[in-house]
Image: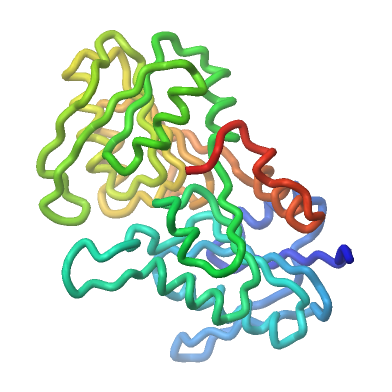
Amino acid sequence: MLVTDVKLFAGSNSLYLADQIAKNYGEDLAKMQLLRFSDGEMQPEIQESVRGSYIFVIQNTNAPADNLMELLMIVDAAKRASADYITAVIPYFGYARQDRKDRPRVAIAAKLVANLLTAAGVNRVMTMDLHAGQIQGFFDIPVDHLNSSAIFIPYIESQKWDNLCFASPDVGSVKRARIYAQYFSADMVICDKYRKRANEVAEMTLIGSVEGKNVVVVDDMVDTGGTLCSAADLLLEKGAKSVRAMITHPVLSGKAYENIEKSNLTELIVSNSLPLAKQSPKIKQLSVAEIFATSIRNAHEHKSINSLFLTQSV
């Protein structure tokens, strides 16, 4: 039986995007407040009945860890209030970079987060452009993995750039870049990088030719911008006509804004899965609110979500 009572809740970290999603969906956000004790301990309080409801909780799980904890507590509150079905809408799935043991004695945090969400009572997860597609396998519940190509491909088509070439900034994003290259019948190159430590690129080499090309670097996230800026330098050094980047999640920590503004990038195009700390003449932000609103509607009405996208998720 189709549940008609849908409620959209927003965590404090993602209220800016949840408002846009709700407007595109055609409903107001459900009433909730976040209380805090004097020591900072939080207590989310749902302020309307959710008994028998199909609810969607919109909240990113990026640092600090309070964002994840708030999501877990909202889900727990909804479950204890007899919500019928709970979907965690996580535009940016934090801790996704820790998806394997790449060194001895480190945590697989992405798997831990998956376990926490399931234990809290989440029935389904909806997210976008995971750092590694196989993270979906960390869950024993359904995962809707949305694809940002639905906003980026129309933008590229509207710009009418000639001699297009798509670049992967590392080996991990090859599949993502190849999808764009195949869609536009364009060439693809790979920037193979070697790191000494996290957020620090020691060496980068180019696989392929970019001579006279307008290059678009494709990736799922940009943090400090170090890899991206190094890739832009390398591509221009090898004869690229221009270098732009199309990145889903603008984490942009540390000196990222300064790095990007001083870089050889012509433009950085990102989604609004995460808010920008400040405006930059080199950064353009596109909204994913309509994609999430439509996906939420289709999930509730048991319709296909994959059919909404021009390309397959990675």
Residue 30 in percent (x, y) is at 76, 68
Q: Is residue 282 visible?
A: no
Residue 166 in percent (x, y) is at 37, 24
Q: In this rendering, would 104 be left or right of 13?
A: left
Q: Nearer the viewer, residue 185 or 282?
A: 185
Q: In this rendering, would 130 be left or right of 298?
A: left
User: Which corner quadrant of the image does residue 83 belong to?
Assistant: bottom right
Q: Residue at x 34, y 58 (%)?
A: 97
**Whether residue 87 is situated above or below residue 312 in the rendered picture:** below
Q: In this rendering, would 296 be left or right of 148?
A: right
Q: In this rendering, would 45 be left or right of 96?
A: right
Q: Residue at x 62, y 79 (%)?
A: 121
Q: Residue at x 70, y 80 (%)?
A: 78
Q: Nearer the viewer, residue 59 or 238?
A: 238
User: Which corner quadrant of the image does residue 65 belong to?
Assistant: bottom left
**Whether residue 225 is situated above or below residue 136 in the rendered picture:** above
Residue 6 in percent (x, y) is at 81, 64
Q: Residue at x 47, y 16 (%)?
A: 185
- Give the number of marks: 0
Q: Is residue 141 visible?
A: yes
**Whether residue 138 is situated above or below residue 274 in the rendered picture:** below
